[in-house]
Amino acid sequence: MLEIEQVRANNAYIINDLAHQIWPHAFRGIISEDQIKYMLDWMYNVQTLEEQINTGQLYYVLKEFGQAKGFIGLEPNFPDAEQLRIHKLYVLPNEQGKGFGRKLLTQAIDVAFDLDLKSLHLNVNRFNESVKFYKHVGFSTIGEEDIDIGQGYLMEDYIMELRLISDK
């Protein structure tokens, strides 16, 4: 049985735990182990996650028979009004290919419609295999950016968008 639950600040450790299981696999061969550790400490620190949740970011965890399999992190109206930003969407490596990523993406679409937002917006590492997933489900690449994240590390990303409501 699959279920998606919203994560509250007091359960932010669930996201931290999943990220530490997923990231070494997701970014192996793309960025260094040192950069993976740096980014996990920076972006998935439990206090940081709690603060994000307490200031309006939305986190959801997908569970199968009560076991966490993946998560998504969303921020309404970022970077612009009428957009739902997907900051994070990850599924455990041994659970990929089972439709869990698509199920989490459907959750984002439902949130966007509930909030009357017109598109989903995300950044993804240009060398990550997940680019294929996003294109497959209808995202378009609308730009590229290199982001200096400190310690000499760089995020080399595509900016992608999925239009939900036409501007016509």
Image (cartoon, rainbow, N blue to C red):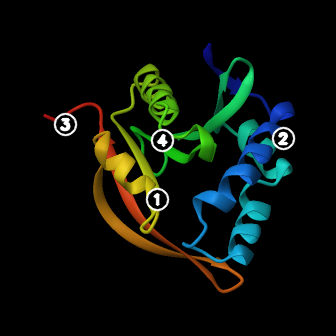
Amino acid type of disc 2? Tyr
Determine the CA span between mark 3 and mark 1. 25 Å
> Which is more foreground, mark 4 or mark 2?
2
Disc 1 crowd, CA 10 A, few/some/many (<14, 14-19, 20+): many
Determine the CA span between mark 4 and mark 1. 18 Å
Please give left or right for residue 66 compared with residue 157 in the image: right
Dot label at residue 37 = none
Q: Secondary structure at mark 2?
A: helix
Give residue 25's quadrant in the image: bottom right
> Which is more foreground, mark 3 or mark 1?
1
- Of labels 4 and 1, earlier in sequence is 4
Dot label at residue 167 = 3
Give the quadrant of the C terminus.
top left
Q: Secondary structure at mark 1?
A: strand
Disc 4 crowd, CA 10 A, few/some/many (<14, 14-19, 20+): some
The residue that mark 2 highlights is 13
Residue 6's x, y, as percent?
A: 68, 25
Q: Who's the residue at 42% across and 67% down the image?
A: 126
